[in-house]
Image (tube, rainbow, N blue to C red):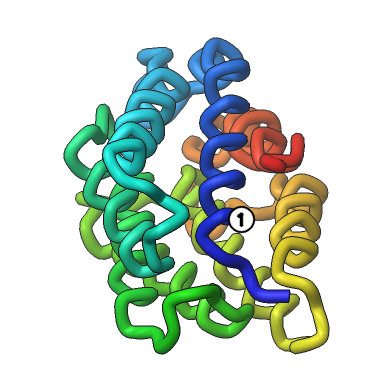
Amino acid sequence: MDINTIHINSILNNSCNLLSREKNYINNLNVFPVPDGDTGLNMILTVRGALNSIKLHSFKAMSIQEYVACFAEGALLNSRGCSGSILALFCKGISDSIKLTDGTESISNDKLSAALKKGCETAYQNTINPTEGTMLTMMRVLSEKFEQLSSDSSNNTLYLIKKNYSQLGRDSKKYTGNASSTEKSRCCRFRSNGISNFGQRDIF
C-alpha cells in the first residue's frame, strides 16, 4: 500500500506531538556542536511552524506534491537553530524530489526512497562543515536503510517506515561514520538515546 496525504499528515502531526512531549529530554541530550540544550526546542518550533502552514489550507484537497512543498516551505521559514535548519533542508530535498513524481494521490516505496535520498543530499550539501555522528548521519542511514527495505515491492510503505525506525534504534551506536574519536564520545549518547530512540518510540 502506498502512502497518501492523509497518512503523511497523520505521521507529521504525531511526530510533532512526540517532539513536544520529549522536548526537554532531547534538549538534555544536546551535546554537539555545543551543549546549549536547545535541540528539542528548535526542532519542535520548526515542525510546528511547518504544520501551521498546512493549517492555512484544506490538506485533504491537496496533492502530495502540494502538501510536501507547503510543509517544506513552512519548515524553512520557521527553522530555528542548527537542528531546525538541517531538518528543514531535509524536508526541502524530499519536496524537490516528490515534485518530479507522477500522480498526486499517493507515493510508492521507490519514489519515497528517492525522496529520502534527495533530502539527505540536500541537508549535507547545504550544511557548513557537515559532521558525521550527528543528525545528518541518522538522516543518511534512514535513507540507506529504507532503500534496502523497499527493494521488496510487496512491503507496505507504512510497515517499512516503522521497521526502518526500529532497526535504526537497535543499530544506532555503530553509526559513527567518519567522526573523530572526540566527536564519537561526545555524540554517542546523543545518537543512541536521542535521535534514534526518539524515532524508535513509534511516530504513529
In the rendered image, the vertical position of residue 155 relative to residue 94, given as above or below: below
Q: Is residue 140 visible?
A: yes
Q: Nearer the viewer, residue 162 or 8?
A: 8
Q: Quadrant of the N terminus?
A: bottom right
Q: Quadrant of residue 28?
A: top right
Report the amino acid beneath label 1: His
Q: Is residue 165 shown left or right of residue 71?
A: right
Residue in the picture at 36% in, 55% down: 91
Pointer 1 local density, CA inside 10 Å: few below 14, some 14–19, many at least 20:
few
In the rendered image, the vertical position of residue 34 relative to residue 4, given as above or below: above
In the rendered image, the vertical position of residue 148 relative to residue 187, given as above or below: below
Q: Nearer the viewer, residue 149 or 37?
A: 149
Tell me where residue 193 appears, x and y as whole percent: 69, 30
Q: Is residue 86 visible?
A: no
Q: Is residue 183 shown left or right of residue 123?
A: right
Tell me where residue 188 appears, x and y as whole percent: 62, 35
Residue in the picture at 42% in, 13% down: 37
Q: Is residue 110 shown left or right of residue 114?
A: right
Q: Secondary structure at mark 1?
A: helix
Tell me where residue 42 appears, x and y as whole percent: 35, 24
Residue in the picture at 62% in, 30% down: 194
Tell me where residue 52 appears, x and y as whole percent: 33, 32
Residue of label 1: 7
